[in-house]
Amino acid sequence: MKKFIVNIFLFLFVSLMFAISLEMVLRHIPNDYSCKKDYLDTHANEIETLVLGSSHAYFDVDPAYFSDNTFNVAHVSQSLDYDYAILKKYDEKLVNLKTIIIAFSYPSLWGKLSIGLEKWRITKYILYYGIRNENDPIKSHSEILSNSFKTNILQILSYFKGTNNIQQTKLGWGTMYCIQNTPDLETTGKKAALRHTIDIHSPDNQKIFANNVAFLDSIIQICQRHSAKVFLLTTPHYKTYREHINEEQLSAMINKANEMANNHSNCIYMNLMEDSTFVSTDYYDADHLCEIGAKKLSLKLANDIKEQNLYKYGDCESNPH
């Protein structure tokens, strides 16, 4: 019996040591979130234009085509509460901040990372940004608990094989959505529109809406203290997406964006959802641009910002990665 108990404790000890080692290795592997955090830690005081938001900013706005110091801190499913938390964390370091671009999309005001399909990403904000919320699940504080054992092992093997798992440029732009990998625009348009359509009248979603409006207002107020402008940006969306969205939800989003712009002198709303200059070859899927479209949009944004006379800088040039 004594030997059995010793063996049990030995097994538990070895298992614990293995789990701790696995966790340490996983946290050591560079990822998109840790790279963004490292860049902000080092260069926040140089940044003049900061891009926030979800995948519509992450894949559609490439800082390489801005002539000022621009960085993209957006990411997939990043909701306004995390946009605000990141900006607040680096507020005092952003001494040269002049412009913020925020992706303001059809589902933005009803989005909340912690209740979405991508809620596993909360772990990344906790571990690599140090952003924590009261209601974060315990498992979100650990890499090994946030993913399957198979996923963790494959990630470690990939790292030791020398595979680069970073899917963004050094300036934070997501590089996964390339023209050669473009899926069907018809199918993706309908699926994405239905996925993003929400019951905006439910009490829970109305509460999320109110909270997100408050987060957005706080972001604008931080920018006011920096004498910085806020561009609320609705990116181009292909017609197959626009044809399947709910008009009431779209109107609520647009009306709130216009209200924010009217109530804050430093806020501008740019609605490019139906911009006809973006054609099918500019899209990766029906609600995201490929690298061709991202270049076109980024050059347009850089030029529009300059035309607002927000600050002086040289001619906007197309900068290669």
Image (spheres, rainbow, N blue to C red):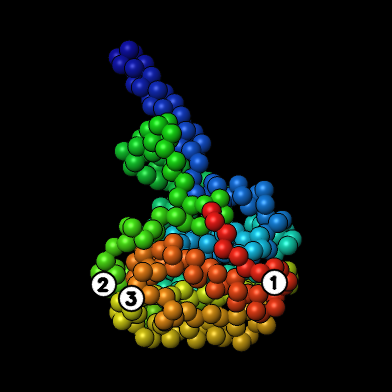
Looking at the image, is 155 positioned above or below residue 307?
A: above
Q: Which residue is mark 2?
A: 186
**In the foreground, 313 or 18:** 313
Which residue is located at x 67 percent, y 48 percent? Answer: 42
Q: Which residue is mark 3?
A: 241
Can residue 153 be seen in the rendering of this structure? yes
Determine whether the residue tagged by mark 2 lies in a helix, strand or loop.
helix
Question: What whole-number distance in Å separates the C-alpha atoms at marks 2 and 1?
Answer: 39 Å
Query: What's the residue type where badge 3 is placed?
Result: Tyr
| Pointer 2 or 1: first along the chain | 2
Mark 3 in CB contact with mark 1 (< 8 angstroms): no
Q: Which mark is residue 228?
A: 1
Query: What's the residue type where badge 2 is placed?
Result: Glu
| Pointer 3 or 1: first along the chain | 1
Q: Which mark is residue 111?
A: none
In this rendering, the label closer to the viewer, 2 or 1: 2
Local packing at callout 2 (Cα closer than 10 Å; few below 14, some 14-19, many 20+) is some
**x, y (%) of residue 81?**
53, 65
Query: What's the residue type where badge 1 is placed?
Result: Ala
**In the foreground, 171 or 250:** 171
**x, y (%) of residue 99?**
65, 69
Count of numbered badges drawn on the protein:
3
Can residue 129 be seen in the rendering of this structure? no
Looking at the image, is 254 positioned above or below residue 74?
A: below
Question: What whole-number distance in Å separates the C-alpha atoms at marks 2 and 3?
Answer: 8 Å
